[in-house]
Amino acid sequence: MQIVVDLNRCQGYAQCVFLAPRVFELHGEEALLYAPTPPDDQAERVRRAAAACPVQAILVGERAGAEAGTDVR
Ligand code: SF4
């Protein structure tokens, strides 16, 4: 799985950090750090985090890979 967070969109609401703390990390007020290729056992949490993001800043899976221009495998 691959994720991309649109950091221009991200407002630091930290819903993702709360739902998937091993993937998303907030430093300070608005600096979001995240793992672009989270382990498979985090997939469900990442999907929940993406769904919960109030500004839909988290792109998940093939779509994210395609937009990033990288091979998902
Ligand atoms: S839930 Fe969305 S807006 Fe909030 S920190 Fe995560 S990516 Fe940013």
Image (tube, grey):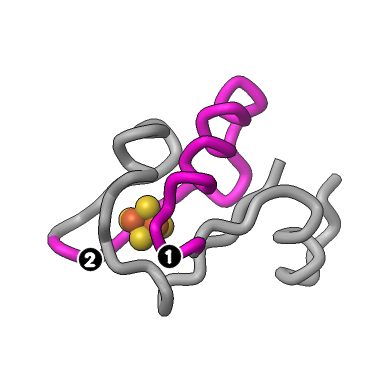
Name above or below for residue 33 compared with residue 57. above
Q: Earlier in the sequence, mark 1 or mark 2?
A: 2
Q: Amino acid at mark 1?
A: Val
For the point 71% across and 60% down, the residue is: 64
Q: Position of residue 69 (x, y in %)?
A: 79, 71
Residue farthest to the left? Answer: 28
**Magenta extent:** 29-56
Front disc: 1 or 2: 1
For the point 38% across and 44% down, the residue is: 16
Mark 1, residue position: 55
Q: Is residue 33 visible?
A: no
In this picture, residue 43 sits left or right of residue 5: right
Name above or below for residue 5 compared with residue 20. below
Residue farthest to the top? Answer: 41
For the point 51% across and 29% down, the residue is: 45
Mark 2, residue position: 30
Q: Between 65 and 59, which is closer to the camera in this rendering?
A: 59
- Dot 1 beta carbon under 8 Å from ligand 1: yes
For the point 33% across and 45% down, the residue is: 15
In this picture, residue 52 sits left or right of residue 28: right
Whether residue 10 is in magenta: the answer is: no
Quadrant of ligand 1: it is bottom left
- Quadrant in the rendering for residue 4: bottom right
Q: Between 21 and 73, which is closer to the camera in this rendering?
A: 21
Name above or below for residue 41 compared with residue 31. above
Q: Secondary structure at mark 1?
A: loop
Q: Residues within 10 Å of mark 1 (few under 14, many from 20)?
A: some
Q: Amino acid at mark 2?
A: Glu
Q: Position of residue 25 (x, y in %)?
A: 31, 46
Q: Position of residue 32 (x, y in %)?
A: 33, 59
For the N terminus, which image quadrant?
A: top right
